[in-house]
Amino acid sequence: MQPYVEALLNHRNGTLQPYVDIKIRWRQIAEDRNRTRAQADHERPPSRSSIYMFAQRYASADLDIRALLPDFQARGNRKARIDTRLNEILDELIEAIYLTPEARTKAALVAACMRHVEALNSAIGQPDAELIEPLPLPTRRMIVRRADQVEKFDLAYYRKDPIKAQNAHLPIGVGPVATRINQRWELDSSTLDVHVVEKQTGARLGRPTLTAVIDCASRLIVGWKISFEGESTLQLMLTLRHAISPKRLNHINIKCPHPGRGIPEGIWMDNGEAHHSDSLKDALNLLHITPYWLPPKRPKLRGKIERWFRSLNLGLIHNIRGTTKSNPKQSEDYDSEDEAVFTLEEIDWLITFWICDVYNTREHRATRRSPIGLWAEMAQEFPPVMPGHAEDLNVLLTRLSKRSVTAKGIEIRGLLYNDYTLALLRNRPDYDPKDLKIRIDEADIGHIYVLGTGMTHYARIPCTNQRYAAGKTVYQHQAVMAHAKKLADKDRQLTEHDFEKAWGELILAGNTLMQTKGRRKTLHRLGRFFAIGIKPVQAPQPSNADHDDGDEDYEFDSFAQGPKPMSSVEASPVPTPPTPRDPEPSTAQPTAITTEHISAAVQKRLQTRRSPPKGKRPGSRPRRVPDENTRSAASKKPQPAATIATVAAAGNPVDPRFESAANDSSRSFKLMEVDYD
């Protein structure tokens, strides 16, 4: 500061050259001082007011250099403007009133602070007084400003949810990385954002549940199941059975083969009741699979399967008729229930087609490889481990139960299971009831599996009433038992005749409700009661429901055939693999979806809508009955923009490394093709 002040005094005394301006002189002084300094330490000339202030102070002190020293102690207020005790009181009240799950407003906080300080001041002079001197009342602006200074993380942590606050505000790191196939599987269930209808009557059944399993190393979807069972033990068992067993999808016209199979090392899943069932734990233990239950409200810990559900919604579900979108704001005025035209069988077929021919063949953003190509490459070094026989999955992935064996056999929910195997087991001298293990297939109660003392394999024990029990699910039998109790006299034991009578009445009542306008929950339960979705996926078949085109029936392509023969176990979702043979992966070109891939039934459902059930739904559109000329003209119109042909990843490039990896993976496919016979 001294050179600038001296230049100003010399300018006043006339000792400077008259043609040199004082501002130019100050700039020259700054340039001279910056010549010997680094670029980062360069200084700018002080302001004009600062130089004049210091010049006046310097002249008044008889040119004493100490007058130019900075007076830091004179800057600002040296005392706290708010009393320390008042600060502590405001902090305590903000924590006790504002940072609570009730999420009280700032107005309530201001009123509480005012009353509390007034109460403290009025208690001065009493024996239990907390203050000696009265505190000034805080102003509303002061309290609101203190509340606004609370961090966003603290607001979300104390006012909303601690886990949500951590997910929203804390940094996210890199999760576990799988280095080989079947090392880490992630399993999750989600309600699909689409309404489905019943095949025969067109009744709205609601939204089904999809359970899927993803392999974290290759990002391949190894198994999936869609039904009305919800997140139940049966749904999980069927999904794992589908994920571990080989996929035989030739009967539904899938171009790219699905190589996913094998027993995983570990599986990560939710903390639901079905995930902690004893049956699932015992099955995973026998298959040597380590279960990992993730903490609740932490979807980021299984981000790969969560992200895949979003890809499925954006790539397929949100672009077909009857979709509900992700939330009501996105769907707006779209009546998804009234526009629903797809059956559960067709939705299952579309999802299977999208997984095999679209998702598994296109390049993944994280791995820069297609899931099917990366799986084939890793399978050469780490071939999948398969169970000894396909029947093992049908036995192990069932519900575990405890019962006693009598002369009548084993009684489970009013049904008897018996044959000579149980008689021999019960008559063994070393028979121990504690060693008895009973497994129930919830998808078919026509038989059970029993393992007892001295037995090396589970024995299949049939139900004595096969006419009633064969092919029925546990949920169906529970509904029959509940209805049979209402029909039978009180305190009377139910018989097989009561079950058959109740079953017949429920079937008649269910068919009647399907043809009338019922409630949502009722129709959804009917979908589960009729076991829709429990059977394996098949190509879409013709339905007898009424449509907008009057008496015109759907036509199907030649490839819309029924399923191939299953294994020796009746109603088993695991097919018996044929003799291993070398696949031809190079012939399957994973190109964009075209209308040739989809059967005529699904194509027509994309352009037409199913008529509502008897009794017009409120708010539904008037039914259009086109004549023959209108039909011929409409058939020439192009597909709408929301069809599968234009939505599901049209034009996605094929991973250039997929073809070479598939050609070089004949050895890996031979290893994975296990002969179970």
Image: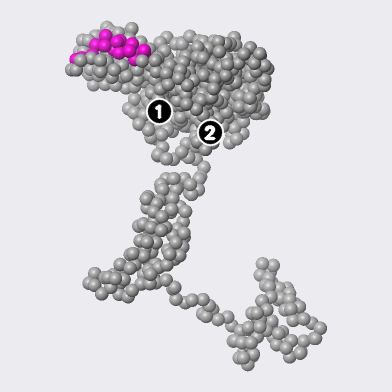
The scheme the figure's colours follow is one colour
Depth check, front residue: 272 or 288: 272
Name the kind of residue labelled 1 in the image: Glu
Q: Please provide percent x and percent y for residue 479.
A: 32, 19
- Image coords of residue 173 (percent x, y): 51, 45
Q: List the residue tagged with mark 2.
A: 333
Task: Please identify the quarter of the rendering in which residue 574 is found.
Answer: top left
Magenta span includes 496: yes
Residue shown at 50%/14% (left/top)? 545
Between 591 and 97, which is closer to the camera in this rendering?
97
Picture coordinates of residue 637, whole percent (x, y): 67, 20
Asked if residue 388 shows in the view, the reply is: no
Neighbourhood count class around disc 1 (C-alpha, 10 Å): few under 14, some 14–19, many 20 upward: many
Mark 1 or mark 2, which has the lower sequence index? 1
The answer to whether residue 148 is left or right of residue 128 is right
Crowding around mark 2 (Cα neighbors within 10 Å: few <14, some 14 to 19, many 20+) is: few
In the image, which residues are magenta?
A: 492-508
Q: Residue furthest bottom?
A: 62
Could you tell me the amino acid type at mark 2?
A: Asp
Element marked by disc 1 = loop
| Residue receiving disc 1 | 231
